[in-house]
Amino acid sequence: MIVKVCGLTNSLDSLTALDAGADALGFNFWPGSPRFLKDAAFLEDLPSDFWRVGLFVNEDPSRVADVMAEHRLDIAQLHKMNSLPGMRVWKAIPADAALTQATIDQEAVEAVVLDTPAGALAGGTGQSFDWSLAQGLTGKIVLAGGLGADNIALAIQRLKPWGVDACSRLESEPGKKDRDKMRAFIQAARKEFDAVC
């Protein structure tokens, strides 16, 4: 069971998430996001015992490969893009009325990230989707979209995902985490995952 915090932009927030028990951290390399990582130098100083996930939106595959190599990223989380050969990929899929098991199964990727449809924003809205749309779906599913300490236990109970991912509801402002909210989310997710295992 994977707990991921996304949209991290600085060392202190990243270390706080890891200390609280996060398995994966997400770093946004899409210039259109308020969480765009303008300066990624701090990644060099982070420990190595977690998954580094780079988020890319409709990006040139060669740039994805360059960024992955430069910052020693483990996983490419792709939005509005096809899978890339030779990389560990999590594919973001909007959870809308068209979502089916076939949608999940056709993706030749390590995992799929089910997120609230966000139009041009490509995620990070802080809004949940109708969880009934994902009820009963199987596979390596990372649940995202409007998750926080107040609803993560129920989300895990209902959908039993392989992982969970939170971003904007853990912030004090875009790109800056509220560390208490972040700790509370991670701890609540870990507790519920332990209960359902």
Image: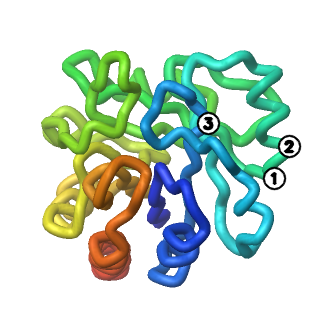
Q: Residues within 10 Å of mark 2 (few under 14, many from 20)?
A: few
What residue is pinned by disc 3?
Answer: 29
The answer to whether residue 178 is above or below residue 133 is: below
**Residue 197 seen in the current view:** no
Q: Give the CA separation, mark 2 to mark 3.
A: 13 Å
Q: Give the CA separation, mark 2 to mark 1.
A: 5 Å
The answer to whether residue 116 is above or below residue 182 is: above
Q: Is residue 89 left or right of residue 63?
A: left
Identify the residue at horizontal 38%, vertical 43% (top origin). 138
What residue is pinned by disc 2?
Answer: 69
Q: Residues within 10 Å of mark 3 (few under 14, many from 20)?
A: many
Q: Quadrant of residue 161?
A: bottom left
Per the rendering, the mark at residue 72 is 1
Of marks 2 and 3, the one in the foreground: 3
Q: Give the CA separation, mark 3 to mark 1.
A: 14 Å
Query: The residue under label 3 is which amino acid type?
Result: Phe
Image x and y of residue 93, in percent: 41, 28
CB atoms of marks 2 and 1 within 8 Å: yes
Number of marks drawn: 3
Image x and y of residue 51, in percent: 65, 60
Q: Quadrant of the C terminus?
A: bottom left
User: Sequence order check: which comes first, mark 3 or mark 1?
Assistant: 3
Query: The residue under label 2 is which amino acid type?
Result: Ala
Image x and y of residue 4, in percent: 47, 60
CB atoms of marks 2 and 3 within 8 Å: no
Q: Is residue 108 left or right of residue 182?
A: right
Secondary structure beneath disc 2? Answer: helix
Secondary structure beneath disc 3? Answer: loop
